[in-house]
Image (cartoon, grey):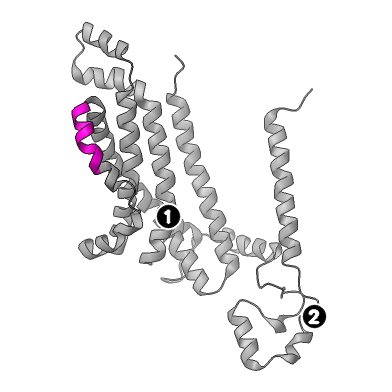
Amino acid sequence: MQPSLSVKAALVSLCLLLTLLGIWTVATKPAASGTASVATLTPEEIEYQKMLGKDPAAGQGAANASGFPTPAQFAATAWKHLSNPVYDNGPNDKGILIQLGHSLARVALGFLLACLVALPLGFVIGMSPLLARSLDPFIQVLKPISPLAWMPLALYTIKDSSTSGIFVIFICSVWPMLLNTAFGVASVKRDWLNVARTLEVSPLRKAFLVILPAAAPTILTGMRISMGIAWLVIVAAEMLVGGTGIGYFVWNEWNNLSLSNVLFAILVIGVVGMLLDLVFATLQKAVTYVE
């Protein structure tokens, strides 16, 4: 029996992963002359090397040529975080699940506010060509603006870093949902609308029983894109505003020169983003229909 495409893809992915791990291991191989070079360095140079994440006096077992963590060091860091993910030792020392919880809460609230604005407005725009043309210049001007460009204005007016982060998520999530909703509603087949008009279906029933099911795949596509952008933006926003969150965790660990923690946080961000996208992909598949 021929192996399925999924099995072949899994094998290729595994080979790529092993290749990357092999390159990583070779690139971070401990320096052969790690301890011998200590004698040639001044105390100031040794201290400078430690500030760069390197420890010339640590010996061959811990030091490496680049100061970049080895796969074994990364695995030890990941196990440390995963074995106790909810500890709280103060403002700058919280478990990874606590940091993720703060980030996901901000994303969820900003995304929900964007849904409350973008979905109804997108419906109205999609059903009104006049309104669509009237609002299009404003949308095209506001849509390309980086969400982080709104952060100084949000901090000045709102005067709260956490709420400002939620506002940034809102402003970056609105546009994909708004445009996709308007496009999906405007693209509903005229034949279906004509049948509803012939049967004298009320506007409310037509919106929920004809237009919404027909436009649902496109609407979910916009929501999926918005969630991906929101998860990207919250990390950068938390780096700026500080406090709590996975973005602040990355920035704080960089300031501590802990590259192992930074790499672990990057992996967590990627995995959570993949899971969020998988949720919306499942919802999109559930509402997709075949004509």
Q: Nearer the viewer, residue 27 or 61?
A: 27
Nearest to N terminus: mark 1 or mark 2: 2
Is residue 249 one of those drawn in magenta? Answer: no
Residue 28 placement, left or right of 159: right
Residue 57 against residue 112 in the figure, above or below: below
For image coordinates 23% across by 18% down, the residue present is: 205
Q: Quadrant of the N terminus?
A: top right
Q: Secondary structure at mark 1?
A: helix
The residue identified by callout 2 is: 33
* Residue 276 spot, x, y in % from top left: 47, 43
Extreme-top residue of the structure? 198
Q: Secondary structure at mark 2?
A: loop
Res. 94 visible in picture: no
Res. 36 visible in picture: yes
Residue 36 against residue 92 in the figure, above or below: below
Task: Name which residue type carries label 1.
Answer: Gly
The picture quadrant where one finds residue 257 is bottom right
Residue 260 placement, left or right of 240: right
Q: Nearer the viewer, residue 75 or 19?
A: 19
Residue 242 placement, left or right of 67: left
In 3D space, how far apart are the residues under numbered discs 1 and 2 (Cα atoms)? Answer: 44 Å
| Tag shown at residue 256 | none
The residue identified by callout 1 is: 101
Q: Nearer the viewer, mark 1 or mark 2?
A: 2
* Residue 252 spot, x, y in % from top left: 47, 70
Residue 271 against residue 185 in the figure, above or below: below
* Span highlighted in magenta in the image: 129-138
Q: Nearer the viewer, residue 257 or 127?
A: 127
* Residue 15 spot, x, y in % from top left: 74, 45
For image coordinates 40% across by 54% down, the residue present is: 233
User: Which is the main secondary structure of the residues drawn in magenta?
Assistant: helix
The picture quadrant where one finds residue 84 is bottom right
